[in-house]
């Protein structure tokens, strides 16, 4: 299984953080207790992303994000899972916030295989990417308090730098969810 990633007009510093986060994720997921093997790949030409997004924006036959991912999948492969970095005012970020007003830093539309981050920090990128691999949030609304036993679980509402490092902090429920999802998708 592999996650594709790219960005729309990030600064060189933010583009570098996104790339580092995505390049580190396979190593972090391979470490026990998670023990998963995934790959990540930079989408070679971010102009392809921009073109696919523009086409989706202009078609409006279906909701914007659905059209965008249909275009991406037609170009990059039917099973593409995509993590995109963009500015918080980019129309892709605004569309995600329409769907989920509580999404302050990023959001995932798992049904179409798209995660979008507009706060470009490794823990946020990892949190959203893990949704694509089957992880669920470990917080409840409206107070956003943690719902799992793992201190600093990356899937809590405010993922912090403490959730990464040498090993991802993940609760046992999400470790099981990730293993099950990845196994199901690769069988």
Image (tube, helix red, strand yellow):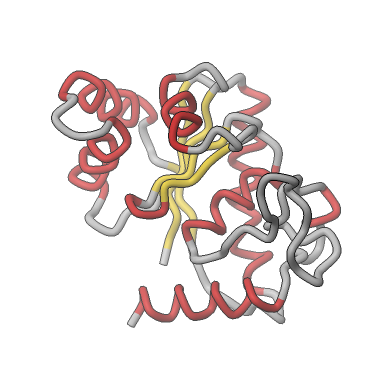
Q: Quadrant of the C terminus?
A: bottom left
Camera-nearest residue between 78 and 180:
180
To which quarter of the image does residue 135 belong? bottom right
The image shows residue 186 at horizontal and vertical percentages of: 36, 77
To which quarter of the image does residue 174 belong? bottom right
Q: Does residue 168 appear to the left or right of 21 in the view shown? A: right
Camera-nearest residue between 39 and 33:
33
The image shows residue 85 at horizontal and vertical percentages of: 53, 33
Q: What residue is rendered at 65% in x and 76% in y?
A: 173
The image shows residue 106 at horizontal and vertical percentages of: 58, 37
Q: What residue is rendered at 72% in x and 72% in y?
A: 171
Q: Quadrant of the N terminus?
A: bottom left
Considering only vertical position in the picture, is 68 above or below 173? above
Considering only vertical position in the picture, is 163 above or below 19? below
Considering only vertical position in the picture, is 72 above or below 94? below
The image shows residue 30 at horizontal and vertical percentages of: 63, 73
Camera-nearest residue between 137 and 3:
137
Q: What residue is rendered at 62% in x and 58% in y?
A: 137
Considering only vertical position in the picture, is 11 above or below 148? above
Q: Does residue 49 appear to the left or right of 158 in the view shown? A: left
């Amino acid at each position: 299984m592999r996650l594709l990633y790219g960005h729309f007009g990030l600064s060189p510093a933010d583009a570098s953080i996104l790339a580092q986060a995505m390049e580190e994720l396979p190593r972090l997921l391979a470490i026990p207790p998670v023990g998963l093997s995934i790959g990540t790949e930079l989408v070679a030409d971010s102009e392809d992303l921009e073109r696919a997004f523009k086409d989706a924006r202009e078609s409006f036959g279906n909701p914007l994000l659905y059209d965008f991912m249909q275009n991406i999948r037609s170009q990059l492969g039917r099973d593409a899972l995509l993590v995109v970095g963009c500015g918080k005012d980019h129309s892709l970020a605004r569309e995600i916030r329409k769907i989920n007003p509580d999404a302050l830093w990023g959001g995932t539309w798992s049904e179409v295989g798209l995660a979008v981050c507009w706060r470009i920090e490794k823990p946020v990128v990892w949190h959203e990417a893990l949704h694509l691999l089957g992880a669920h949030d470990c917080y409840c609304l409206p107070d956003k308090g943690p719902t799992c036993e793992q201190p600093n679980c990356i899937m809590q509402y405010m993922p912090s730098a403490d959730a990464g490092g040498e090993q991802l902090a993940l609760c046992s429920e999400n470790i099981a969810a990730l293993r099950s999802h990845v196994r199901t998708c690769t069988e």
